[in-house]
Amino acid sequence: MAETGETLSYIELDRRSNQGAQLLFKLGLRPGDHVALLMENGFPFVEICWAAQRAGLIYTAISRYLTPGEIAYIVADCGAKVFVTSPACEAQARGLSGPILFMTGEAAPGFRAWDAEAAAEPETPIANEFAGRDMLYSSGTTGRPKGVETTLTPIPLGTIHPLLKLLCEMCGLHQESVYLSPAPLYHAAPLRFTMTAVAFGATVVIMKSFDAEAYLQALEKYRATQTQLVPTMFVRLLKLPSETRAKYDISSLTGAIHAAAPCPVDVKQQMIDWWGPVLIEYYAGTEGNGVTIINSKEWLEHRGSVGRAYVGHVKIVDEQTGQTLPPRANGVVYFAGGPPFVYHNDEAKTRSAHSKEGWSTLGDIGYLDEQDYLYLTDRKAHMIICGGVNVYPQETEDVLIGHPEVLDVAVFGIPNEDLGEEVKAVVQLRDPARANKALEAELIAYARERISAIKCPRSVDFERDLPRTPTGKLLKRLLRDRYAAGR
């Protein structure tokens, strides 16, 4: 752990994860069953993921910043038979029904003691051990999170996903490496890269939470060689005073992987100027249907690109005609020939993500240049990326429309220097004369009582009418463009 220097050896991880796997097996879980966990960054998080991994189970890590209702929905939707949390997350986990409830550390009433029960189990592997994997949730256009369904095949426990292996090898990760993980482990990339670095045999240093100067301190202290970040972290690092940035020796760093949100060209240029050509960017989704990758040398020759396809083949498709578009023409980004995926319990959403040819899309807009480098020019339909976290506005709109004063509402992202984007709401009131600062504050508080803070508007503006077509379709782009004008 970066902040405390507390360590967990490989032999201890092996012992504890074996005991966890034995406990899960004893409880009746078998390969393909689901486990859910809700906790802060720490050794128990990693131990439980490895316990599920080596028991052939599917594990779902849940954001600790979701509301109890959102957490309960994910636990029910994934069909978790066991749920493990920590004392820090007790309030959000209380009241869950369905799975067997465990808590690490000192268990609160209503929860079984994970540490004590696991410690009583054998330290040897379960019989017929093979690898499980994660099933993480990616929010859908309906606002409800959707799991990307996982199909298990009996592969050896040490097998590393080919894409993750490729990315790790591209940034030079090996058994002697030191991988620094500064992000919440419930996100797909931090969890998967941490698990992969362990599978490589590297030293993994986990931060409890990201702080720009503390991150630089950890880079220097642990002589980190690889790391994984999001562009918001770059912004916060660059905002440190120049004397602070110059104070730390980061010369050990040979590979910095980044994704999750588009990185502004000037931000990335400044990071390359500071850190050298160690940045590796990839474009992909939790769905795993395709991947593009670009290193720093390529990026300097194709500024703004997210790279060329390494998994699948990129097709740019006209949304109206369905025709494949030529270089430099904007259209919907599809992957052809990539791995198939299914949204758990949502056939309609799965169908909508696929073309008649069987190509699949994450819903982004972009174009290819003449050398097949991909450039993204818009986001998934109406999606907001706030500090690297995907926020879909439909759920926020659904909450705000329930307020008695609200007649119509549009929620979208507006530029934010620190976070990339922030959530903005524009509201049409039943009585326009009621528009004032007090009502703005009331609407924000109303949303915060019902959904997680990251999904709530930071500000609310009022309009007499929102732009809709005669068929009722909200022309959200007209509003978004207005706020983006001149930025």
Image: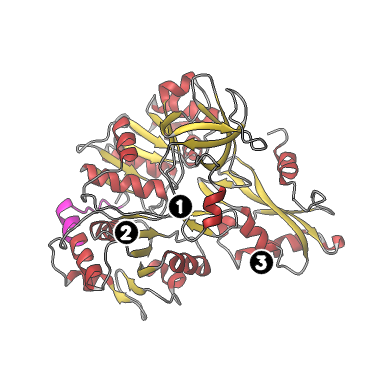
Name the mark nearer the viewer: 2 or 1: 1
Residue at screen point 82% across, 50% down: 470
Q: Which residue is the site of mark 3?
A: 446
Q: Is residue 334 above or below residue 97?
A: above
Which residue appears at 27% of the width and 35% of the height?
173
Are discs 2 and 1 less than 8 Å apart at CB? no
Residue plotted at (20% across, 56% down): 13
Which segment is the magenta one? 4-16
Q: Which mark is residue 45?
A: 2
Residue 405 appears in view = yes
Which residue is denoted by mark 1 in the rendering? 342
* CA neighbours of label 2 inside 10 A, class few (<14), some (14 to 19), many (20+): many
Disc 2 marks a residue whose amino acid type is Phe
Q: Position of residue 336 (x, y in %)?
A: 47, 36
Query: Nearest the camera: 225 or 168?
Result: 168
Front residue of 443/310: it is 310
Q: Is residue 296 above or below residue 288?
A: above
Kindly indicate the quadrant of the structure image that contains residue 97: bottom left
Is 6 included in the stretch rendered in magenta?
yes
In this picture, residue 320 sits left or right of residue 106: right
Q: Is residue 431 magenta?
A: no
Circle 1 packing at 10 Å, graded few (<14), some (14-19), many (20+), is some
Between 273 and 405, which is closer to the camera in this rendering?
405
Residue 121 placed where, x, y %?
16, 70
Q: Amino acid at mark 3?
A: Tyr
Q: Is residue 147 above or below residue 419?
A: below
- Left or right: where 324 falls relative to 53: right
Residue 166 on image: x %, y %: 31, 34
Query: Quadrant where the C terminus lies?
Result: top right
Q: Earlier in the sequence, mark 3 or mark 2?
A: 2
Number of marks in the rendered image: 3
